Amino acid sequence: MRSLARAYDWLLTAMAVVSAAVIGLMALAIMFDVIVRNIGFRPPPHTSAAVEFSMLYVTLLASPWLLRHKGHVYIEVLLAHVDARWKRIFALVTYATCFVACLLLLYYSLNLTLLNWQRGGADIRSFDMPRWLLFAAMPPSFLLMAIEFGRFLLGYDSLYDRGPPVV
C-alpha cells in the first residue's frame, strides 16, 4: 500500500513538474515571438494557438498537486467566526460538494473526450489538432482531484489545516 501511495505522490509531482516546464516554454515562446516581431521578421504562426492550448493543460496538470499541497484559493471568513463543530460540518459539506463536482466533471469530460475521439474532428487554427486532445487531460485531472477531495472527506487530511509553506 505504501508503494502505491508513493507512486501516486510521484504522479502528482510529475504532473506539476510538467506543468511548470510548460509554463517556462510558454514564456520562452512568447518572448521569441515578440523579439522576432520587433526586429522586423515574421513570427511563427503557431505561437498563439500553442500557448492557448498549453494554458489549459498547465491548469489541469497542476490542479491535483495544488490541491494535495493546499495551494487552492479558499475563503476562511465564515470559518473564522464559528466554533470547531461547525467548522467540521462546513468542511465536510465542502469536501462532499467538491468530490461530487469533480466526479461529474470527470464523467462529462470523459464522454466529451471519447465522443471527439470517435468523430475524429479537428480544432483548426494555425495548425490542426485533433479535438479530443483538447479534452484529454480533463478526465485524469478531475479523477485525481476527486481522489484528493475523497481523502479530505475520509479524514486523511484537511484542506483547512495549513502545514509549512510548499516550495
Image: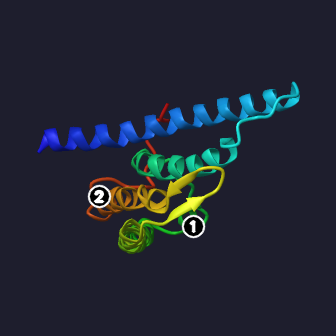
| Residue visible at 53% across and 65% down in the picture | 79
**Which mark, residue 151?**
2
- Which of 77/157 is in front? 157
Which quadrant of the structure image shows residue 15? Answer: top left
Under circle 1, the secondary element is helix
Amino acid found under the numbered disc labelled 1: His
Q: Residue furthest top?
A: 39
Q: Residue at x 53, y 46 (%)?
A: 58
Residue ID at (60%, 59%): 124
Q: Position of residue 125 (x, y in %)?
A: 64, 56
- Residue 116: give x, y in percent of width and height: 42, 69
Q: Using residue 26 as the reference point, say whether residue 151 is left or right of it.
A: left
The tag earlier along the polypeptide, 1 or 2, is 1
Secondary structure beneath dot 2 equals helix
Residue 56's place in the image compared with 113, above or below, is: above
Evaluate if marks 1 and 2 touch, with contact meaning CB atoms under 8 Å apart. no
Displayed quadrant of residue 107: bottom left
Residue 81: mark? 1
Residue type marked 2: Arg
